[in-house]
Image (tube, rainbow, N blue to C red):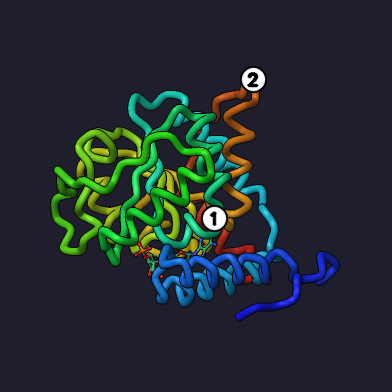
Amino acid sequence: MSQKPLPKSHPRFSSLSQRHALEAGVKDGITHPTGLIAFGRGEAFDYLLHEKTHPFAQKAIAKAAQEIRKAKNFVISVNGNTSALCPREIVQLARASGGKLEVNLFYRSEERIKKIISALKKSGAKKVYGLKDDARVSGLASDRAKISSKGIGSADLVLVMLEDGDRTEALRKAGKKVIAVDLNPLSRTARKASITIVDNVVRAIPLLTAELKKKGAKSDAAYNNKKILRQAEKAIRKG
Ligand code: PTJ
């Protein structure tokens, strides 16, 4: 459906722009139609968080940057929603972190993977894993189990965004650290991840890239993910 450009002065400009990015993603065959519903769930939490990055998310971002610096094989897992919402920002994060990109889908099809890889390449990505799956995440029934041995298969640290919870659990069981970006602090992904950034991906990913570029970032040995999730839940309840 063609429409007039959104006025930047609209109080919900950012949120509406994200909706339209996903609408285009569905039209282009990148985003699965149910991704719109998943986004709506996130949007409700974002509304309660006043669509801003809170200190608990900043803390998680700082810890995530620290873990990325230490990682031997950091992989960013990309799905249909994130590739429509913030492809350029994801590629910039891969560049700043030296991490690999891998497409991993719940509703897996070769056609969608190819389209997502091409969208990431248009945004500047060089190599993107995921089309050829030669390994599996054990204990996972869904197609998300299909991975590349050179990507997620050999990763020690994986970034997941907008996930269904069982993969995070299975990745942890496989001995990998997981950074999750999820607006819902009650989700299984949020609870099972090593570090949970409770924030919208469109804000969290550029902030993580900026954090990685900072020199002399200090280490925070006292990081406690359960505490971060409690703080996020409290902020949502307060509204
Ligand atoms: O592209 P595919 O085939 O891999 O399919 C992906 C979807 C998104 C359809 C699939 O992973 C899914 O159904 O996800 P869920 O189980 O609905 O979980 C999505 C989680 O992401 C929920 O906890 C939402 O609150 C959260 N979320 C939604 N939008 C955002 C978000 N978190 C951060 N930023 C967002 N913009």
Quadrant of the displayed image that contains ligand 1: bottom left
**What residue is shown at x 63% (from left), y 51% (from top)?**
203
Position of the N terminus, as image quadrant, is bottom right
Q: Position of residue 32 (x, y in %)?
A: 39, 70
Question: Which residue is tagged 1?
Answer: 198
**What residue is shown at x 44% (from left), y 31% (from top)?**
67
Residue nearer the viewer, 183 or 19: 19
**What residue is shown at x 34% (from left), y 61% (from top)?**
112
Q: Is residue 22 left or right of residue 109?
A: right
Q: Given the image, on which type of amino acid does mark 2 rest?
A: Lys
Question: Which residue is tagged 2?
Answer: 215
Q: Given the image, on which type of amino acid does mark 1 rest?
A: Val
Q: Residue lying furthest right in this view? A: 9
- Label 1 or label 2, whichever lies nearer to me, is 2
**What residue is shown at x 18% (from left), y 58% (from top)?**
140
Element under label 1? loop
Q: Position of residue 18 (x, y in %)?
A: 61, 65
Residue 27 drawn above or below residue 63: below
Q: Is residue 164 left or right of residue 5?
A: left
Sequence-wise first label, 1 or 2:
1
Residue 207 drawn above or below residue 68: below
Residue nearer the viewer, 221 or 52: 52
